[in-house]
Image (tube, rainbow, N blue to C red):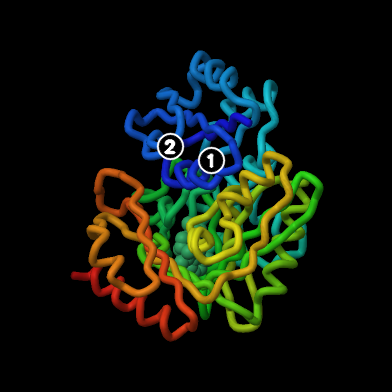
Amino acid sequence: MRIGILGGGQLARMLALGGHPLGATFVILDPVHDACASAVARHITGDYTDQEKLKQFAGMIDIVTYEFENVPAEAVEYLATKLPVYPPVHALAMSRDRLYEKSLFRDLGIPTPKFFNVTSLDELRQAAKEVGLPAVLKSRTLGYDGKGQAVIRSMDELENAWSSRLAGVDCILEAFVNFKREISVVAVRSRAGEIIFYPVGENVHSEGILRHSVCSLNDPMQKLAEDYITRLLNNFDYVGVMALELFDTGGELMANEIAPRVHNTGHWTIEGAQTSQFENHIRAIMGLPLGGTSPIGHCAMINFIGTIPPPAPVLEIKGAHYHNYGKAPVPGRKLGHVTVCGENQKEVKAGMKKVLALIAG
Ligand code: AMP
């Protein structure tokens, strides 16, 4: 089967690597000439809204998937008139807009921080009174890795946040959550509606970017996280992998956002689970039986951001698996990751410590 992926970054690259053993072939559409997935897929270099390129892309593939949620809507809508698109277009549309996303959480009974739509400074002032401070002002669309958001700690900061950071953009204001930890659950739903889950990941972010994620076996929040993501998956009649990011406030979970795609907090599954999230996404969209999601021992994933060490010192660490995405180093850019696997938590923690020391050095 020929699979088209909108976007040619590291997620597309790992999807292709996961799908090749199944006999799938891959074509990516990405405007960047050296998109890192082009090492493992045919590459159409072109804008997502270029009708000619879209037509060419559609002619080379049997089904379409995507690796990021900010794909222009018109590109996906056009492709959906010609080919099956997985995950479904309405899941993509929902996840692209934080207002719709949070409203859906509320409608499905999934707790989420209190939020208000704000379109003016006056509305922002009113929302701040309702939500209380601190609060987080977030752009409704095009926000990822903490981009397009500002924490507001006092009423004095309101005006500044509105005019200098997010002015002119549709926003929501949401309550700041004093979470105990951030977790995510990654699940996959087949075309027949079967849903299976990976163990939740315990995630650490800094400056809005995921730094590391530890696979949490027998997590006390596993079942609740599974319940919430199941409601979302069934709501969309979803096909493929989805991730749900949650705040754990200590016995309660609040949904932050969904990703209708494979997710950074699921990268550990390549070496750490019976079937990786990438292979399972491809299996789901091809209509194949899903693969087991059970973990193989303990493991954690650490991102290389801005710089990437050479492989040798990383691979000297017991249980370490090195991934270099082949991207040019730019501050704040995800360039690769390492997964540390071990027989117990202590071994994994020791390996993580060594990786973090290498990154710091
Ligand atoms: P997001 O782009 O919404 O995933 O946010 C990026 C990161 O900012 C999250 O992973 C959290 O660490 C932090 N964050 C986002 N929203 C909130 C919130 N309402 N309260 C506290 N921290 C938040």
The residue wearing badge 1 is: 20
Q: Quadrant for residue 40, please give it.
A: top left
Return the x and y of residue 151 as percentages of the image width and height.
42, 64
Secondary element type, mark 1: helix
Crowdedness near tag 1: few (<14), some (14–19) or many (≥20) residues, C-alpha within 10 Å: some
Q: CA distance from mark 2 to mark 1?
A: 9 Å
Ligand 1 neighbours mark 2 (CB distance < 8 Å) = no
Asked if labels 1 and 2 touch by Cβ distance under 8 angstroms, the answer is yes
Picture residue at 62% right of the left edge, 44% below the top: 282
Please determine whether, in this image, residue 184 is positioned above or below residue 20.
below
Residue type, label 2 = Val
Residue type at numbered disc 1: His
Q: Residue furthest bottom?
A: 346
Q: Is residue 195 left or right of residue 198?
A: right
Q: Earlier in the sequence, mark 2 or mark 1?
A: 1
Identify the residue at the far right of this view. Answer: 192
* Image quarter (top left, top right, bottom left or bottom right) of the C terminus: bottom left
Mark 1 Cβ inside 8 Å of ligand 1: no
Taking the image as shown, residue 152 lies to the left or right of residue 141, namely left
Kindly identify which residue carries mark 2. 40
